[in-house]
Image (spheres, rainbow, N blue to C red):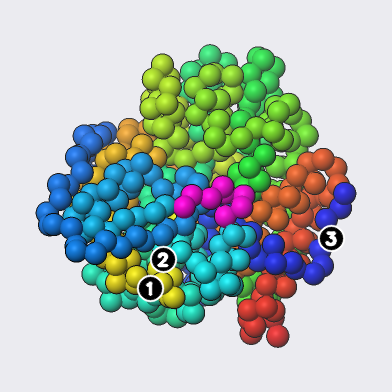
Amino acid sequence: MKKPFKALSAAVLASLLLISCAAPQAPATQPPAVEPTTASADPTTVAEPTTAPEPTSAPVAEPVTLTYMASQDWIKDAELELAKKFEAETGIHIDYQIIPADQYFALLKTKLNAGEATDIFGGQSGKTDLKLQYDVENNAVDLTGEEWTTRMDPNALDQVSLNGKVYGAEIWDIVASNYFIMTYNKVIFADLGLEVPTSYAEFKAACDTIKGAGIVPIFEPISDGWHHVLWFPMVGPRYEEVTPGLAAQLNANETTFAESEIMLTAMTQLNELYQSGCFGDNTLSDAYADTSKALASGEYAMSVATLTAPVSMATDFPEAKAEDFGFFPIPLADNQLAPAHPAGPSKFIYAKSPHIEEAKQYLAFLMEPENLQYLLDNTPQFASLSFSGLTPKWTAEQQEFMNTYEVKTIVYQDAVNYVNPQWMDIGKDMVTMFTGGMTPADVLAAIDQRREEMALTALDPAWK
């Protein structure tokens, strides 16, 4: 069934990717390359996990409970341990309310509109999201004067800022956990005599060879609604390379997605991968939670995943080896650039919370250097954090990727306004395309229609 491109519903404004993804105001000039701010001198050295800091003070006389709502996978086990230490030190309890990813943003929007949000709420960073999804100037506390802002990566800090004020705390790995790239099984490639592809044609040929050997070329979990969308905006640096200034033109309403030949090429190639069976027979029902299992099994040769995916896989499946996996950029439209992506899950303090000072205290506690290091060392999905003064834990394979592939610009969900808030709707349109109800051109036109409606809602002067 063809998806209408007209009136934008509340669900569109509520839809948003978890993992990964936010859409800031793109600069007039090409943004600088994003480099890890905590690179180690010896990239092959993996830091030993540290122990959580011991309590240093007695509990307060009257304990407070802070409520904290977040999407699934945003709160790591190490943070839960730190919350226990925080309670032991201060008497302040953290009540985590974890919501399924496909329900989270709709629920958050409902609570914000009703004036009933939790003391702390999670959200993807990015200027469009801060303005349209969370209305941070009315719903979040200004954190500009907090000490930890001076240690935060400038690119990440910009993603949680609006009109010169800081509203969020992004405690996230903006490189190893944010660079979604092709993760491939080096053993399978070697057995089949395959080289790392440097173009879409080579990539498609490799998929055909792998499929001919009885192996599913790519594990693509479409059922979650968000993962398959990554293929398209993550190659934004390639769009910018082919059409310099395209992001700025889009933000100025001087062109559209549908008018971009390079975007049409990428969307058409993605559809070709699906139609030719490169994602396997179960892709529509495959789930992201099974990524580690799929890679460890050897039944799949590749997946779009992060630089820490093999480390997480080896943690869950010790029989698998992280060093057996390598990385290369998503090769749609012949992309060979690394996907700089400084936006990610962030923490905001609700402006109407009765416990604003206690919430600030908790954020400050989490961002003490020793606690950040504990979180980093004890989270397999992280190799670095977006703060200075920490010791990262890059593997040789991760460092090889960063040394091989150039970083030029940020991904399009960060660079182009009104893209990230419609993430899940883009995913629905892509599924309709896969199943024959829309063409690649139709999908691009739908993105344009929603962008226009969001821009008008935001009173964007470029759309007047």
Query: Image point 41% across, 48% down: which residue?
Result: 75
Say which quarter of the image contains residue 363: bottom left
Dot label at residue 119:
2
Q: Amino acid at mark 3?
A: Pro
Dot label at residue 354:
1
Q: Is residue 31 above or below residue 314?
A: below
> Is disc 3 placed on a helix, strand or loop?
loop
Q: CA distance from mark 2 to mark 3?
A: 37 Å
| For the residues bearing labels 2 and 1, Cβ distance under 8 angstroms | yes
Quick check: can you spot residue 414?
A: no
Q: CA distance from mark 3 to mark 1?
A: 43 Å
- The spot of residue 427 in percent (x, y) is 69, 50
Q: Is residue 264 above or below residue 142?
A: above
Q: Residues within 10 Å of mark 3 (few under 14, many from 20)?
A: few
Mark closer to the observer (2, 1):
1
Return the disc, 2 or 1, that comes first in the chain's sequence.
Answer: 2
Residue 457 relative to residue 18: left or right: right
Q: How many marks?
A: 3
Mark closer to the observer (2, 3):
2
Q: Is residue 244 above or below residue 288?
A: below
Q: Is residue 99 magenta?
A: yes
Q: Residues within 10 Å of mark 1 (few under 14, many from 20)?
A: few
Magenta range: 97-104
Which residue is disc 3 drawn over?
A: 4
> Is disc 1 placed on a helix, strand or loop?
loop
Q: Amino acid at mark 2?
A: Asp
Query: Image point 73% across, 50% down: which residue?
Result: 428
Quick check: can you spot residue 379?
A: yes
Front in this rendered view, residue 273 or 246: 273
Q: Is residue 159 magenta?
A: no
Query: Image point 87% across, 49% down: which residue?
Result: 1
Mark closer to the observer (3, 1):
1
